[in-house]
């Protein structure tokens, strides 16, 4: 009896070495992107506008948004998980512990620079660096991320990826959203009138 083996084969890098192969793949890719333009635009429209501090996490957010726009939902969830963690790492630098009036860092306190995200969120919330509302949103993002990173449960990746994007945008919009807004694609101070 002959045993069948299933394989996943990708020879694109080899094909691209030949001019005819490169041309063929280029034409195929161009066709595929043209067919997806309307879906990409629809997904772009689903993402809320935002105004935020341009921290280290903002480059990761841009990558997560691109993933969502191109329909890469698992990648979007992963990237927002990374983005949220980078965001909270930046915030956790504001946490100060004092022992006998001496400052001590999280690393010194726990002898471990790799503090788990849940513990980091707990400290940020307890120290009032993030609100209860922000804490709950970040916990939800982490939970959705874990559902896909440790795939024990099935989920709707498209729905979940948009949810984590929106939750994170709500969090970062909070700081600047009180002072600025976006109307018709333009940036305004809230007390400034539209043209």
Image (cartoon, rainbow, N blue to C red):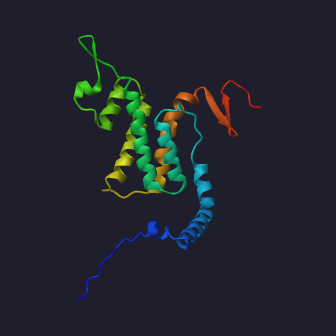
Using the image as rendered, state which of residue 78 and residue 131 is in the foreground. 78
For the point 41% across and 69% down, the residue is 10
For the point 46% across and 35% down, the residue is 56
Mark yes or no: residue 18 visible. Answer: yes
Q: Position of residue 95 (x, y in %)?
A: 35, 23
Q: Is residue 121 above or below residue 40?
A: above
Using the image as rendered, state which of residue 66 and residue 168 is in the foreground. 66
Q: Position of residue 148 (x, y in %)?
A: 36, 53
For the point 22% across and 29% down, the residue is 111
Q: Is residue 161 above or below residue 115?
A: below
Which quadrant is home to the N terminus?
A: bottom left
For the point 58% across and 49% down, the residue is 46
Mark yes or no: residue 160 visible. Answer: no
Which quadrant is home to the C terminus?
A: top right
Query: Which residue is outermost to the front?
Result: 18
Q: Position of residue 160 (x, y in %)?
A: 45, 51
| Residue 182, quarter of the rendered image | top right
Looking at the image, how many numbered discs can be counted on the residues?
0
Query: Which residue is outermost to the bottom?
Result: 1
Q: Position of residue 7 (x, y in %)?
A: 34, 73
Q: Is residue 181 left or right of residue 168?
A: right
Q: Is residue 141 left or right of residue 152?
A: right
Query: Which residue is outermost to the right?
Result: 195
| Residue 102, quarter of the rendered image | top left
């Amino acid at each position: 009896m002959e045993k069948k083996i299933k394989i996943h084969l990708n020879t694109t890098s080899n094909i691209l070495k030949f001019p005819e192969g490169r041309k063929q793949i280029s034409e195929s890719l161009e066709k595929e992107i043209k067919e997806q333009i309307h879906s990409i635009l629809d997904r772009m429209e689903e993402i809320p506008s935002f105004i935020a501090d341009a921290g280290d996490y903002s480059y990761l957010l841009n990558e997560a948004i691109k993933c969502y726009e191109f329909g890469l939902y698992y990648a979007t969830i992963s990237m927002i998980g990374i983005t949220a963690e980078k965001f909270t790492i930046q915030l956790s630098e504001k946490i100060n512990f004092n022992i006998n009036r001496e400052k001590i860092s999280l690393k010194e306190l726990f002898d471990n620079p790799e503090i788990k995200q849940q513990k980091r969120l707990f400290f940020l919330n307890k120290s009032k660096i993030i609100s209860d509302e922000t804490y709950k949103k970040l916990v939800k993002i982490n939970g959705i991320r874990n559902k896909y990173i440790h795939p024990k449960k099935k989920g709707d990746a498209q729905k979940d990826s948009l949810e984590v994007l929106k939750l994170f945008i709500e969090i970062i919009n909070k700081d600047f959203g009180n002072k600025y807004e976006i109307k018709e694609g333009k940036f305004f101070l809230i007390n400034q009138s539209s043209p």
